[in-house]
Image (cartoon, coloured by chain):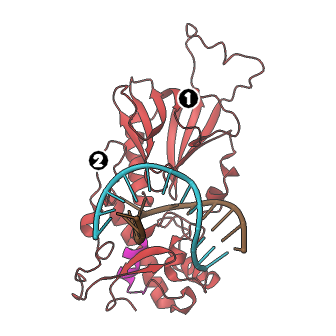
Chain colours: A red, B cyan, C brown
Amino acid sequence: MPELPEVETIRRTLIEKIQNQTIEEIICYHPDVLVNPDDISLKNWLIKDIRRRGKYLLFDLEKAKLNISENNSSENNLNHVAKDSCVMMVHLRMTGKLLLEENIVEPAKHTHVRFVLSNGGSLDFNDTRRFGRITLFAPGHEFNDHGFATLGPEPLGYDFTADHLINTCKRYSKSTIKGVLLNQQAIAGIGNIYADESLFRAGIMPGRKAGDIPKTKIKLLHQKIREVIAEAIGYRGTSFRDYVDGLGNKGFFQLQLAVYQKDGEPCPNCGTTIERIKVAGRSTHFCPQCQK
DNA sequence: GCCAGCCTGTTG
DNA sequence: CAACAGGCTGGC
């Protein structure tokens, strides 16, 4: 479901509400979803920060100071090495959501993990298709994850330059340009919506080989990628199907889409009918007149 | 590189 | 009923 602008919007809505809140307990209703290779404790974690990289969210957690009156004997077991911090990595994939609840309510149908918060509410991880994952890492171990470790530059970061995109197109010269944009090792955070919209704004056919595109066009594409991603964050993401942020609110960038899911409709530029084809295994929308 | 597979739900 | 859905992985 969510691409970079949606994940960033979720991060912003959550950090405002739950920074410095304590996760009293992590309850897992579906064992596949919560990955805990270091066998980290599921109780009493203070949320210090929430970061984003590509489509990943990283929660920086610190062991919360416990009240002496609380029954925490299992935590004091000498055979259990207490860890005083950890990183929780969340990937929402297609249908994952992180939803704040003000009170403890009956878990929704596809709620697989619940974070019980010290404010009396909860943060629920809900994911219809169950592709999403939550992974707990001991301090400094977040780079154990291959997908995370091999991410390309952030589209809005200083290291994503036009030259970088030119070199990336050389490296993946035999791939389609859309395939390059969807490759998280090439650039982090772009998905099907923003790939189609960036290529439309740059006037490039999605099925073109990356190696055949002139430098001036790649420079334009670099600029359009940054433009589209920044605009979409401003609009709080795209709610095409069922995306909502951490508070259950929709985004508005669907109102700005030029080609994504617009097949059969006129191009906003020239009026030519938008077409839909398959590129890089994904449905792809473009204007046959504006994109060459 | 490409593409089936991972899952469930919705749409045609 | 089949096709498709905002993503990623691993096996050819």
Magenta residue span = A195-205
Considering every residue shown, the one lying at the far right of the view is A79
Q: Amino acid at mark 1?
A: Trp
State which quarter of the image contains the N terminus of chain A: bottom left
Q: Circle 1 sits on which residue?
A: A45
Comes first in the chain, label 1 or label 2: 1
Per the picture, the main secondary structure of the magenta-coloured stretch is: helix
Q: Residue at x 69, y 45 (%)?
A: A141
For residue A125, side relative to residue A271 (left or right)? right
Q: Is residue A242 visible?
A: no
Q: Amino acid at mark 2?
A: Asn
Q: Residue at x 43, y 52 (%)?
A: A95
Q: Disc 1 and disc 2: Cα gap in Å? A: 27 Å
Q: Nearer the viewer, residue A115 or A67?
A: A115
Quadrant in the picture for residue A241? bottom left
Residue A116 drawn above or below residue A142:
above
Quadrant in the picture for residue A15? top left
Q: Circle 2 sits on which residue?
A: A249
The percent coordinates of residue A200 (x first, y second) are 36, 81
Residue A68 drawn above or below residue A140:
above
Residue B4 drawn above or below residue A221:
above
**Badge 2, how many Cα within 10 Å: few under 14, some, many 20+?**
some
The percent coordinates of residue C6 (x first, y second) are 43, 63
Quadrant in the picture for residue A236? bottom left
Residue A181 lies in magenta, yes or no? no
Q: Indicate the chain on which mark 2 is placed.
A: A
Residue A202 lies in magenta, yes or no? yes
